[in-house]
Amino acid sequence: MLASLRIAVAVLKAAESSMSERQVPPLGIRIPDAARKELEAGAQSLAREIESLRVALKEKPDKLELLPDIQIFHKAADWALRYDELYRSNEA
């Protein structure tokens, strides 16, 4: 029983060390600097538009519930760039 416990501990330690080296999700492809800057500028522009929309919709609370539907597109683009999660060239 003691031998089984030692083996289990060794397996867990090996798994732990290999997991700390692996990034999940893996890094995506490299986006050319010009394309990255253009995408980042577009994401910043969209963030400003969303903020102005939030202010405008405060007067129309029934429409404010639609804001998350718009914000999700901004987050998708922003996070994909921020965390290097573009995996195919046509995603850019």
Image: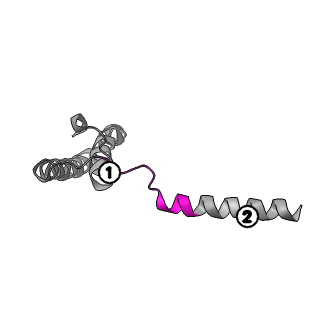
Badge number at residue 16: none
Placement of 55 over or under 9, stated as above or below: above
Q: Which residues are magenta?
A: 17-28
Pointer 1 residue: 79
Going 34% across and 42% down the picture, which residue do you hit? 72
Regarding mark 1 in the picture, which secondary structure is present there? helix
Neighbour tally class for label 2: few under 14, some 14-19, many 20 plus, Cα within 10 Å? few
Disc 1 marks a residue whose amino acid type is Trp
**Coloration of the structure image:** one colour
Furthest-right residue in view?
1
Disc 2 marks a residue whose amino acid type is Val
Going 23% across and 47% down the picture, which residue do you hit? 50
Q: Nearer the viewer, residue 29 or 8?
A: 8
Within the magenta stretch, is there residue 24?
yes
Q: Nearer the viewer, mark 1 or mark 2?
A: 2
Q: Quadrant of the N terminus?
A: bottom right
Placement of 75 over or under 5, stated as above or below: above
Badge number at residue 9: 2
Give residue 52's position: percent from left, percent from top.
19, 50
Neighbour tally class for label 1: few under 14, some 14-19, many 20 plus, Cα within 10 Å? few
Discs 1, 2 touching: Cβ within 8 Å:
no
**Spatial CA span between label 1 and label 2:** 37 Å
Placement of 63 over or under 3, stated as above or below: above
Going 78% across and 65% down the picture, which residue do you hit? 6
Within the magenta stretch, is there residue 91?
no
Give residue 4's position: percent from left, percent from top.
83, 59
